Amino acid sequence: MKVINKPAILISWPRELDMFSVFSDRVLENAVIIVDDFIYAESERFENGKSIIKLLGEKVEYVLLSEILGKVKYSVLFSTGGQTFQKKVTYSSYFKYIYAISIGSFIYNFGLSKVFLDVINRPLTGGGKCAEKSGKYPIERAIGNTVIKYPKGLDVNRAQYPESQWKDVFDVYLCHSDIDMGLIINKFPGAECVKIGYPRYDNVPSVKDAKRDIYNEIKNLDTEKPLLLWMPTIIRIKEELIDNIRVWSDIIKNLLSEYNVLISVHPKLAMISSTIISDLEGIGFLVDATKGRNLGVLYQSSDLVLADYGGPVLSTIYMKKKLILLNSPSKKYAQWRRNRMYIDDDVRDDVSAFDIHNGVNLIKQIKINIKYNDSLNRDKLKDKYFGKDCNYEYLREIFSKLIK
């Protein structure tokens, strides 16, 4: 197999282009972009490859995964571990299939999967009668000699991060901060880790320029009103989709007369719920569902961010923007918050967070936060979770030596 002495970046989702953009521009030279053009069954991954190619445009060179697989390897491969996989029937996958259609189906049919899900957070069905004989196997080792894990965010599950299968996939782990680095080293003693901060939010335009860009692009934004950026994540628990947007919309819509309320709909949710955008626009909200959106510009343009869980919580902290959190009424999420299961659950000790029954106080707090500046506290909050900014010259030297 031909080995090309260049770094390559595997892109599995459109949003990963934004994740890699600043890092590749500042650290990597002549990096080859590999577009995952495989066809997957999940509805949210429908035509992902076409979307990525469209965002790349004609000026950016790329190769298709389907065309290089089995023919070419790159000396160094960067990947987010974004679920690019091959399907193969192996002894292991076939054994799992037999388990699923027998014991797994029994567990599901008698309602035991819910008990296991509550106790150990796994249903133990193995997919039940819907299981397949083939297994899913990561693609990275087949196209890269040295494989480097690129971080997708600091919104990680303490107990499950890093994923066990990564130990056999990645040689080096890039980390946002000491927090995720500590989790990796604790689970994989001796793992090689490099802190890179949060590159996708570095090198963003000034607040003035970001506002100009967003106000010019998003129709019906009133330049005289402050901009509230609502960044709900997609909340899914074992096939259950929790809509934390509609839960809060009746309360947040009371702010429309005083503020621009721009909702950034998660790309996966836009694929799963075909009416979510039109429904929100019908209420009067402004909606952004742009694939490949430069989130750094979006955050920078805001006067306050409303978030709930996941990436937006830590992204807002990194960007030093004002933040208020909206709790989900889900009992499962309430339990996770109490147990501090995710890193972003800790943030609820540092910023205001509200339950659905406390809408009046939420509205009051938003108005207070918009009026007053607490930049010193926001600086401290970023230092707490991310530490000092990274030196890109130092990072370039590290990866230049690794590639050579």
Image (cartoon, rainbow, N blue to C red):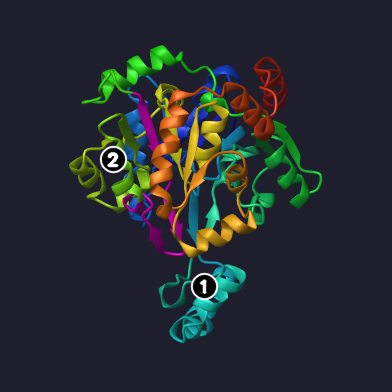
Other residues around mark 1 within 10 Å, as few (<14) / some (14–19) / many (≥20): many
Residue 223 in the image, given as x and y percentages of width and height: 28, 18
Label 2 sits on a secondary structure element that is: helix
Mark 2: amino acid: Asn
Q: Residue at x 51, y 45 (%)?
A: 353
Q: Residue at x 50, y 52 (%)?
A: 85
Residue 141 in the image, given as x and y percentages of width and height: 61, 45
Residue underneath mark 2: 254
- Membership of 244 in magenta stretch: yes
Could you tell whether 97 is left or right of 178 in the image? left
Could you tell whether 145 is left or right of 370 in the image? right
Residue underneath mark 1: 126
Could you tell whether 253 is left or right of 400 in the image? left
Nearer to us: label 1 or label 2? 2
**Mark number, residue 337:** none
Residue 112 in the image, given as x and y percentages of width and height: 51, 82
Choose the circle earlier in sequence order: 1 or 2.
Answer: 1
Could you tell whether 368 is left or right of 155 in the image? left
The residue nearer to you, when weighing 255 against 230, is 255
The residue nearer to you, when weighing 190 against 57, is 190
Can residue 46 be seen in this snapshot?
A: no
Mark 1: amino acid: Gly
Residue 22 in the image, given as x and y percentages of width and height: 52, 22
- Labelled pair 1, 2 in contact (Cβ < 8 Å): no
Label 1 sits on a secondary structure element that is: loop
- Membership of 382 in magenta stretch: no
Label 1 vs label 2: CA separation? 45 Å
For the N terminus, give its image quadrant.
top right
Q: Residue at x 60, y 73 (%)?
A: 119
Q: Which residues are magenta?
A: 226-247
In this rendering, the answer to whether 202 lies above or below 76 is above
In this rendering, the answer to whether 132 lies above or below 99 is above
